[in-house]
Image (cartoon, rainbow, N blue to C red):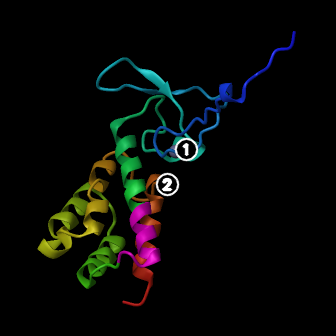
Amino acid sequence: MTTSSPRSRLIVVVAVCHLCGDPAPGDNRPPVILRPGLGGPRPVRLCARCRSIRPGRDRGELVPDDETWAFLERETTALGQDYESGRWLPWRDELHWAQNLRATTWTQSAVEHALRDAGPHVSTGRLVHVVEPLPGLLALVDDGDPALRTLRRFLDNLTAGPA
Ligand SMILES: [Zn+2]
């Protein structure tokens, strides 16, 4: 008797990073624990990048700031791509605001201040929306933290062009 293994039975499960959705292959490191508001704690996988630069990287569990950081990364990357492709162009006011923010030492109060002072025009733009989670993260990480590198690079890129 021969046994056959129908192709339809073959299911490839690709584990993805809980924070960014990139592939997160299994390894021998201990899992990171997620404690959702509802339901019990459960282990989740993270990609190597998120594991090494998330704000709560010193802890064995995910902290709310890790989710906030993942949101900041997603939004910054999306806006950066739209800028590169020409789908989004900053207003002159926004560019000026970005230049000031880039030149500021990022502390929680300094960035909160910058957001408050953005003015009605800049406040409605996409750039402010991207930066909004930053003060919360600065409670956990400082100015030069690798977690903020994507936003830094984006602002560098944005303000490097001809004004
Ligand atoms: Zn990830």
Residue 30 appears left or right of 124: right
Count neighbours of disc 2 (C-alpha within 10 A) and say few if under 14, some if 14 to 19, many if 20 or more: some
Question: Earlier along the polypeptide chain: callout 2 or callout 1?
Answer: 1
**For the view shown, which residue lies furthest in the left direction?**
120
Residue 55 horizontal/vertical position (percent):
42, 44
Residue 126 in view, yes or no: yes
Q: SS of the residue at dot 2?
A: helix
Between residue 43 and residue 82, name the one nearer to us.
82
Q: Which mark is residue 146?
A: 2
On the image, the x and y values in percent for residue 16 come to 55, 39
- Specify start and end residues of the magenta stretch as a single range: 77-88
In the image, 81 versus 116, the foreground residue is: 81
**Do the CB atoms of the residues marked 2 and 1 lie less than 8 Å apart?**
yes
Circle 1: element type: helix
Indicate whether 104 appears above or below 39: below
Q: Name the mark on residue 52.
A: 1
Viewport quadrant of the C terminus: bottom left
Q: Residue at x 55, y 44 (%)?
A: 52
**Residue drawn 42% across and 33% down?**
62
Disc number for residue 160? none
Residue 89 image-quadrant placement: bottom left
Where residue 111 sits, quadrant-wise, is bottom left
Residue 44 vertical position relative to residue 54 in the rendered view, above or below: above
| Mark 2 vs mark 1, CA separation in Å | 9 Å
Question: Is residue 111 highlighted in magenta?
Answer: no
**Picture layout, residue 111 above or below residue 52:** below
Q: Residue furthest bottom?
A: 162
Please tell me whether the stretch drawn in magenta is mainly helix, strand or loop: helix
Which quadrant of the figure contains the N terminus?
Answer: top right
Q: Amino acid at mark 2?
A: Pro
Tell me the kind of residue under disc 1: Ser
